[in-house]
């Protein structure tokens, strides 16, 4: 899919590179700064200078925040973030980078300029012609995959299909393996209260969710458990009875994850031909440039990206 034609072409200075000694043959991950007036630029800098990033990959920074006042969002600051995304797409296509960690963009400002995507997840999927992908959030205590993403709640029952649940379940299973869980257990949340109460509180569990779980367990025996009542499922997931939870809609997964892992939550797009992660927070214009923003989530996003890139490289070298 072509990118929106009415946005200006990127005019980005040469990217800064950060390489450990003897790093010529290592994979490379790029940071995009996000909206140049938000916390993205400073958090990228803090993450790189933290000493907490794995040295088994190289790092690049894409985007230019010079001349932009932190905390004062403008059309220009939003477009700087978009230009960084465009550059990342080109570098990924050219094979110069193997993963990207995206800073938070100002979607509302970009919508006014013709940006047609609900978020960066959809931007990358469309840019690479990927139709089947999934949004996953992960932190130290909880991992969730979403069967539906950025749609109004009233549209969720119609958008929820057996095929979607199976596809997201497969991607979530693969993600657990790449994180090092060799025998993953994945809980499946019901859509309705009490997982439908045997059809008395909704038919989606019987008609859609249960058939999907049965087929998933035919492919991956004993991995998927559900559908379960969401209110108790997350308690068991927090106790580490499950490595991940397959959720039916956006807030079903994000509310518990942000409550438990707010500072270190990471957004991962599953199903892309490369690794893409991002910190699980927004532009935070109100604290940008004040030294108040914490880099925990940005660091966690970079560390996870490094783990996934190296896992994919090892997988390729096996075949």
Image (cartoon, rainbow, N blue to C red):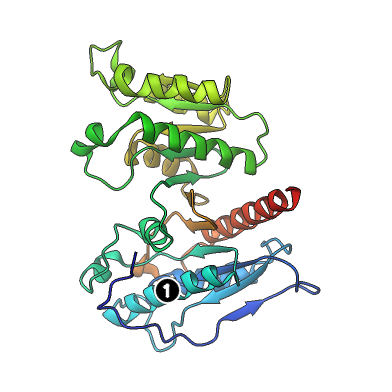
Residue at image coords 30%, 76%? 73
Label 1 Cα neighbours within 10 Å, binned few <14 / some 14-19 / many ≥20 = many
* Place of residue 182 in the rendered image (x, y in percent of width and height, measured from the top left): 68, 33
Q: Residue 121: name its quadrant.
A: bottom left
Q: Is residue 134 above or below residue 38?
A: above
Q: Residue 226: name its quadrant.
A: top left
Q: Is residue 46 above or below residue 271?
A: below
From where the camera sits, is residue 72 visible? yes
| Image position of 274 (left or right of 132) | right
Q: Is residue 153 above or below residue 33?
A: above
Q: For numbered disc 1, what is the local secondary structure?
A: helix
Residue at image coords 33%, 78%? 79
Residue at image coords 33%, 69%? 2
From where the camera sits, is residue 290 visible? no
Q: Quadrant of the N terminus?
A: bottom left
Q: Nearer the viewer, residue 273 or 255?
A: 273
Residue at image coords 31%, 83%? 8
Q: Nearer the viewer, residue 286 or 131?
A: 131
Query: Which residue in the structure is indicated by mark 1?
Result: 86
* Place of residue 39 in the rendered image (x, y in percent of width and height, measured from the top left): 43, 69
* Place of residue 229 in the rendered image (x, y in percent of width and height, measured from the top left): 37, 20
Q: Residue furthest front?
A: 319
| Image position of 33 (left or right of 49) | left
Give the number of callouts: 1
* Place of residue 308 in the rendered image (x, y in percent of width and height, measured from the top left): 62, 52
| Image position of 274 (left or right of 70) | right
């Amino acid at each position: 899919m072509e990118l929106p034609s009415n946005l200006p072409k990127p005019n980005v200075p040469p990217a800064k590179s950060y390489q450990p000694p003897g790093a010529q043959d290592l994979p490379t991950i790029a940071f995009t700064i996000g909206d140049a007036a938000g916390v993205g630029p400073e958090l990228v800098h803090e993450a790189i200078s933290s000493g907490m990033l794995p040295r088994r990959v190289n790092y690049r920074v894409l985007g230019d925040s010079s001349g932009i006042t932190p905390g004062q969002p403008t059309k220009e600051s939003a477009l700087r973030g978009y230009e960084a995304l465009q550059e990342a797409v080109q570098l990924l296509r050219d094979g110069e980078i193997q993963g990207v960690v995206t800073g938070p963009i100002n979607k509302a400002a970009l919508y006014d300029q013709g940006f047609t995507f609900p978020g960066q997840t959809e931007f990358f999927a469309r840019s690479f012609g990927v139709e089947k992908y999934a949004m996953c959030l992960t932190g130290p205590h909880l991992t969730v995959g979403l069967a539906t993403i950025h749609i109004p709640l009233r549209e969720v029952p119609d958008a929820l299909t057996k095929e979607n649940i199976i596809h997201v379940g497969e991607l979530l299973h693969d993600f657990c393996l790449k994180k090092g869980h060799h025998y993953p257990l994945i809980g499946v949340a019901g859509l309705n209260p009490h997982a439908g109460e045997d059809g008395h509180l909704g038919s989606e569990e019987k008609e859609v969710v249960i058939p999907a779980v049965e087929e998933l367990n035919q492919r991956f025996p004993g991995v998927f458990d559900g559908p379960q009542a969401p209110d108790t499922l997350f308690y068991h997931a927090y106790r580490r009875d499950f490595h991940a939870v397959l959720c039916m809609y956006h807030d079903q997964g994000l509310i518990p994850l942000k409550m438990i892992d707010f500072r270190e939550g990471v957004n991962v797009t599953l199903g892309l031909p490369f690794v893409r992660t991002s910190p699980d927070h927004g532009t935070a214009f109100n604290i940008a440039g004040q030294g108040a923003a914490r880099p925990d989530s940005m660091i966690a996003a970079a560390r996870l990206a490094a783990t996934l890139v190296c896992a994919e490289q090892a997988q390729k070298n096996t075949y």
